[in-house]
Image: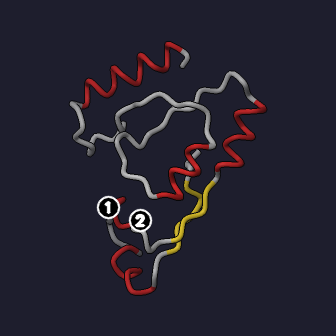
């Protein structure tokens, strides 16, 4: 499940996004309006106490509202983004980190 349910972007930048490849930075501009799935995620966690929540945003930069939504979540481990495009650390190191966290049951 993704924390962000939807993003509304101003008309003047729709042509830069719709039907084209774009970076996540384009979606997370301050001028965009985001809605979240926090309540739905928390409901899944409550109904499934053994479920593991693993964040995929790495060292992402968060806006004030994003941080507010994240503060509602249970404590989450820090994990580097699993995306091969993210260059925080080497990909094999990321894979090892994800494997270790998954098997530790954090």
Q: Residue at x 55, y 45 (%)?
A: 70
The location of residue 103, given as percent across then percent down, is 49, 14
Q: Residue at x 41, y 43 (%)?
A: 57
Query: Is the N terminus in the top left, top right, bottom left or bottom right quadrant?
Result: top right
Q: Residues within 10 Å of mark 2 (few under 14, many from 20)?
A: some
- Which residue, given by chain and number where applicable, does mark 2 sit on? 27
Write down the quadrant of residue 11 in the picture: bottom left
The location of residue 65, given as percent across then percent down, is 53, 58
Q: Note whether 71 is above or below 28 in the view shown.
A: above
Q: Describe residue 57's horizontal placement relative to residue 51 as left or right.
A: left
Q: Furthest-right residue in view?
A: 47
Q: Nearer the viewer, residue 33 or 2?
A: 33
Q: Note whether 79 is above or below 16 in the view shown.
A: above
Q: How many numbered discs?
A: 2
Query: Is the C terminus in the top left, top right, bottom left or bottom right quadrant?
Result: top right
Write down the quadrant of residue 100 in the picture: top left
Query: SS class of the residue under badge 1?
Result: loop
Q: Nearer the viewer, residue 92 or 36?
A: 36
| Picture disc at residue 8 | none
Colour convention = secondary structure
Query: SS class of the residue under badge 2?
Result: helix
Q: Note whether 48 is above or below 37 in the view shown.
A: above
Q: Describe residue 77's horizontal placement relative to residue 69 as left or right.
A: left
- Which residue, given by chain and number where applicable, does mark 1 sit on? 23
The location of residue 46, given as percent across then percent down, is 75, 33
Q: Furthest-top residue in view?
A: 104
Q: Residues within 10 Å of mark 1 (few under 14, many from 20)?
A: few
Q: Residue at x 42, y 30 (%)?
A: 78
Q: Describe residue 73's horizontal placement relative to residue 58 as left or right.
A: right
Q: Residue at x 36, y 38 (%)?
A: 81
Q: Note whether 52 is above or below 61 in the view shown.
A: above
- Tell me whether the residue at label 1 lies in contact with that at label 2, contact meaning CB atoms closer than 8 angstroms: yes
């Amino acid at each position: 499940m993704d924390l962000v349910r939807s993003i509304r972007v101003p008309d003047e930048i729709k042509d830069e996004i719709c039907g084209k490849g774009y970076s996540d930075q384009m979606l997370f501009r301050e001028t965009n309006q985001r809605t979240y799935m926090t309540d739905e995620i928390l409901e899944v966690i409550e109904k499934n106490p053994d479920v593991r929540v693993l964040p995929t945003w790495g060292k992402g930069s968060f806006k004030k509202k994003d941080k507010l939504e994240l503060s509602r979540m249970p404590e989450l481990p820090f994990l580097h983004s699993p995306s091969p495009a993210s260059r925080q650390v080497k990909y094999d190191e990321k894979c090892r980190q994800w494997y270790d966290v998954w098997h530790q049951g954090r």
